[in-house]
Amino acid sequence: METLWNRYRKHLCTSTEIGLALDISRMKFASSFFAEMEPAMQKAFTEMRELEGGAIANRDERRMVGHYWLRNPPLSPSRDIQSLIEAAVAQILAFTAQIHSGAITAQNGAPFTNILVIGIGGSALGPQFVADALTSRSDRMKAYFLDNTDPDGIDKVFAELGASISHTLTLVISKSGSTKETRNGMLEAQAAYRCVGLDFARHAVAVTGAGSELERVALAEGWLERFPMWDWVGGRTSVTSAVGLLPAALQGIDITALLGGAQSCDIVTRSIDTLRNPAAVMAMMWHYATGGRGTKDMVMLPYKDRLLLFSRYLQQLIMESIGKERDRDGAVVNQGLTVYGNKGSTDQHAYVQQLREGVANFFVTFIEVLKDREGDSFSVEEGITSGDFLFGFFQGTRAALYENGRESMTITIDRVDAYTVGVLIALFERAVGLYASLININAYHQPGVEAGKKAAGTVIDLQKSVMELLQREGRSMTAGEIAGLLGKPGEAEMVFCILRHLAANPDRGIVQDSAEQTAEVTFRIAT
């Protein structure tokens, strides 16, 4: 029987150029697996080359997919696109220099010290991950995020900002400008600035598409600056565009190093030598672990506090890309790859018990970081540091899972810095693209998300109709009565839920009268 040491030596994929190694020795694939999958992987490499060359990869929307060009503009299929990318990076660096130097100040003349990022999905998850992973004592500005339309969450952020809102720069990020969560956050921010006698436009920056609703607002109101978003960059792969680079640069992060790490990883993962390409090997392991059908979840366990938000970022990148009802031929396949995670060694006190002894419906991806901290560590025991304990817990968890038949792979990186964060982002972007090719799905559209947005709009339209009816009728009515009068008897449950929500908020002007039976509960306009 092959020893683990021999298996480790045989299957360790080391990329010294980017300071990364991928260990798949604890994945129990057969010796024939890679040879059997090689034709499919070579096809995936071909499709990736076509994508990078400017092919229409997002076929539903007839769009190119160009996030790889963002960190290597000469790779783009036209000089115009190359110029756009290069100009955007130059604009980010120039604007950041003006903010940091005090050439651009807040309305009261004070330098900006905070950033408030308003966005959702790819316009928030990537920037949040980067901000949290790379924060340091030398940050030039502190980052805050409005990434939902939850009023209480919005209030919480503005309470944290307090009086410092007067020297807070707000970035509103939305490609179309019509994303409701982002629009609501912008309107709430405008109100918060007005409450303290400030002009929002004197503190606002837009990151948006040309000609968008948001760009029109920014132009009309005279916002400080506008930065581009392009239709060939999807939200979940936009972190190396202005979406992620602008807040990172303002925070004080070295975006040149981040782009350099992503570019270097792109070069390594462009190799068609499968066993030397860590993104290809990882995609192959996803296929092996899930049978190419998403039958197991991927648990992300980074043994580094700075990488805590990585699993949240990967949830969108992977699940929005891979979770599709139909394949590229139109067949119903219901594909997906569920991602969740925590951090080591917190996970050992949270859910490793189930991972080791419960339902074996997962595989683990560990992330090991070799460098413990900047500077020397002191001993917490004779000759042993806190970092040694963290390493021991990682190795112990890995061994305990393997002993009980639970599979895992391990990504090892030297340190967490801007360059390595760029490497990790590019590694998973490439793995997603390759895996999508292996299972024949379109990784670059999101019809389910659009369906959810449409459904939400229907609820808002129904709420407006309900309120108009109650105001017109001027009497107490049950949800069933209201739905009937609206000609929508099948929507009685939704009408009830809408009114219950409104009644729980006194400022909305709805009163709920109790009854023993739900169907008999009545609602009326407050007088």
Image (cartoon, grey):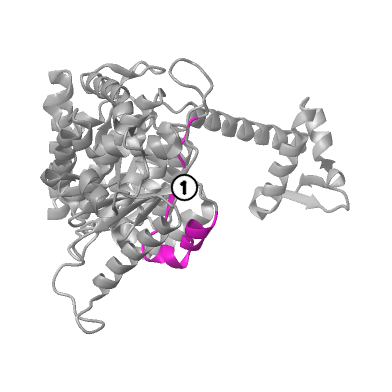
Camera sees residue 35: yes
What's drawn in magenta, residue-wise?
335-358
Which residue is depicted at the point 72% across and 48% down? 500
Q: Nearer the viewer, residue 493 or 381?
A: 381
Amino acid beneath label 1 = Phe
Q: In this picture, is 476 found above or below 105?
A: above
**Quick one: SS at disc 1?**
strand
> Residue 393's spot in the image, x, y percent?
34, 67
Indicate the quadrant where residue 206 lies. Answer: top left
Q: Which of 355 and 105 is in front in this view?
A: 355
> Residue 242's spot in the image, x, y percent?
24, 38
Q: In this picture, is 338 found above or below 412?
A: above
Q: In this picture, is 296 found above or below 161?
A: above
Residue 352 falls within the magenta-colored stretch? yes
Name the residue tied to disc 1: 362
Total numbered labels: 1
Residue 321 falls within the magenta-colored stretch? no
Furthest residue to the front?
1
Q: In this picture, is 193 found above or below 348?
A: above
Camera sees residue 239: no
Furthest residue to the bottom?
382
Which residue is depicted at the point 16% across and 67% down? 374
Indicate the quadrant where residue 384 lies. Answer: bottom left
- Image position of 357 (left or right of 48): right
> Residue 317's spot in the image, x, y percent?
37, 38
> Residue 387's spot in the image, x, y percent?
25, 70
Indicate the quadrant where residue 195 lies. Answer: bottom left
How packed mark 1 is, by other alpha carbons closer than 10 Å (few <14, some 14-19, many 20 or more), is many
Which residue is depicted at the point 39% across and 56% down? 402
Which residue is depicted at the point 21% across and 56% down? 416
Q: Nearer the viewer, residue 27 or 380?
A: 27
